[in-house]
Amino acid sequence: MLEIIYNNPNQKNVRRKLRKDSTPQEKILWLHLRNKKLGINFKRQYSVGGYIIDFYCPTKRIGIELDGFQHLGAKEYDNTRTEFFKVLDIKILRFWNNEIDKNIDRVLEKIKMQICA
């Protein structure tokens, strides 16, 4: 049986709940990513395998993860996720929530640089 890797329908309710319960930082970044504001289409809470990426651009294969205090003790888990995406040729950009709060312009520049790479 073919495994559904991208946006598995079994995870639809989880993705929906994550969108509904977005952090303030996710909402801020989404305002800058939605409607192709950076020239490409991003999706919110997009599943790949058993993981859900905060923001994902299928055409450029770029995932964006926002990390808060809950990630302080999750370095090994985050590294495992990143390696999984790497095998699928998906580049993951990680930003701390305080980067969104304090310097959204710098975050957007980093994303733009990856888009153009």
Image (spheres, rainbow, N blue to C red):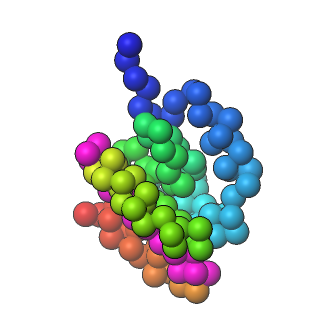
Indicate whether 117 appears above or below 4.
below
Quadrant for the N terminus, please: top left
Q: Position of residue 23 (x, y in %)?
A: 68, 64
Magenta stretch: give its range: 87-101
Q: Residue furthest top?
A: 1
Residue at x-position 54% and y-position 60%: 33
Please check the rendered image and state whether residue 29 is part of the magenta-colored stretch, yes or no.
no
In this orientation, which residue lies closer to the viewer: 39 or 106?
106
Quadrant for the C terminus, please: bottom left
Question: Quick check: can you spot residue 30?
Answer: yes
In this orientation, which residue lies closer to the viewer: 61 or 11?
11
Residue at x-position 36% and y-position 45%: 59
Q: Residue furthest bottom?
A: 102
Q: Position of residue 6 (x, y in %)?
A: 44, 34
In this orientation, which residue lies closer to the viewer: 38 or 63?
63
Please check the rendered image and state whether residue 93 is part of the magenta-colored stretch, yes or no.
yes
Q: Position of residue 67 (x, y in %)?
A: 53, 68
Residue at x-position 51% and y-position 34%: 7
Q: Position of residue 106 (x, y in %)?
A: 46, 81
Question: Quick check: can you spot residue 90?
Answer: no
Residue at x-position 70% and y-position 69%: 24
Decide if residue 28 is on the left or right side of residue 109.
right
Decide if residue 18 is on the left or right side of residue 39.
right
